Amino acid sequence: KAGVTQTPRYLIKTRGQQVTLSCSPISGHRSVSWYQQTPGQGLQFLFEYFSETQRNKGNFPGRFSGRQFSNSRSEMNVSTLELGDSALYLCASSSNGGPTDTQYFGPGTRLTVL
Amino acid sequence: AQTVTQSQPEMSVQEAETVTLSCTYDTSESDYYLFWYKQPPSRQMILVIRQEAYKQQNATENRFSVNFQKAAKSFSLKISDSQLGDAAMYFCAYRTIGNQFYFGTGTSLTVIP
């Protein structure tokens, strides 16, 4: 099976712009979660989607949003970018998102905001 | 809110030796799940080991084992017979029953040949 893929791998934007990141889960997986990884904060949970519905949400401002399509692919959008949004954005997929399911992580999208 | 603390930003171990990475967490829940993830340099994060809080027996996966002390809210990872491929950033994570994940800030492990 192909692993979790994320596109693009690298992105440079300027403050005020918006960005869309994409995540393709492992075939058959219906749960996709997004995380923000920064050196100071570690990994922080953004949100989880399951069957096209947002099931869980972390403590991020409304500028961060996401969606999931019927094929389980997910996109994350960040509007009005700030310098502090520079980070590695990881997505992870699992079969059903259950607590005993193993999450498989993608390689991440490195976002730099100038 | 749950918090996960990894008090060792960096650790090093001699090849073939044993190293223990520390993790503590804060929660008021009685049921939850704990994980250790490994993130090698420039590579994807992978699951190392998982522990269900309702299980008293410590989880073991080959050379990796945990010391889970629920009352102390401690969840350390022991790596035996360390190998060069074990060099990575290790993250401790807490997962609620409601599927919210909380990660520690990571411990960078160096393996010395």
Image (cartoon, grey):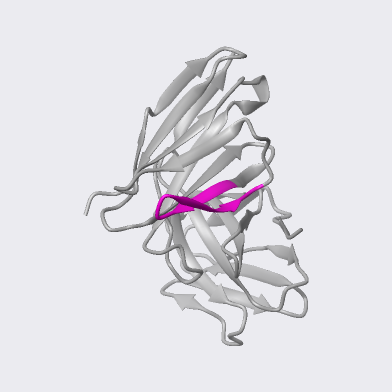
Point 67% across, 63% down: residue: B22
Q: State which quadrant residue A59 falls in.
A: top right
**Position of B59 relative to B97 (above/below):** below
Judge whether B3 appears above or below B73 on screen: above
- Nearer-the-camera pick, A96 or B78: A96
Q: Residue at x 47, y 58 (%)?
A: B15
Let me know if residue A56 is in the magenta part. Answer: yes
Residue A89 coordinates in the image, percent (x, y) = 51, 36
State left or right for residue A26 relative to residue B84: left
Q: Is residue B103 left or right of residue A75?
A: right
In this rendering, does residue B51 appear at all?
Answer: yes
Image quarter hosting the N terminus of chain B: bottom right
Q: Is residue B112 visible?
A: no
Q: Residue at x 65, y 21 (%)?
A: A82
Q: Is residue B81 left or right of residue A28?
A: right
The residue at 70%/55% (across/down) is: B6
Stretch in magenta:
A46-58
Q: Of residues A108 and A93, which is closer to you in this image?
A: A93
Residue A45 at x, y = what percent? Answer: 59, 48
Q: Residue furthest left?
A: A1
Query: Is residue B103 placed above or below A84 in the rendered structure?
Result: below
Q: Residue furthest bottom?
A: B56
Overall secondary structure of the magenta section: strand
Residue B32 image offset from top left, x and y in percent: 62, 73
Whether residue A8 appears in magenta in the rendering, the answer is: no
Q: How many marks?
A: 0
Expressed as whole percent of the image width and height from the top left, the position of residue A47 reads 55, 48
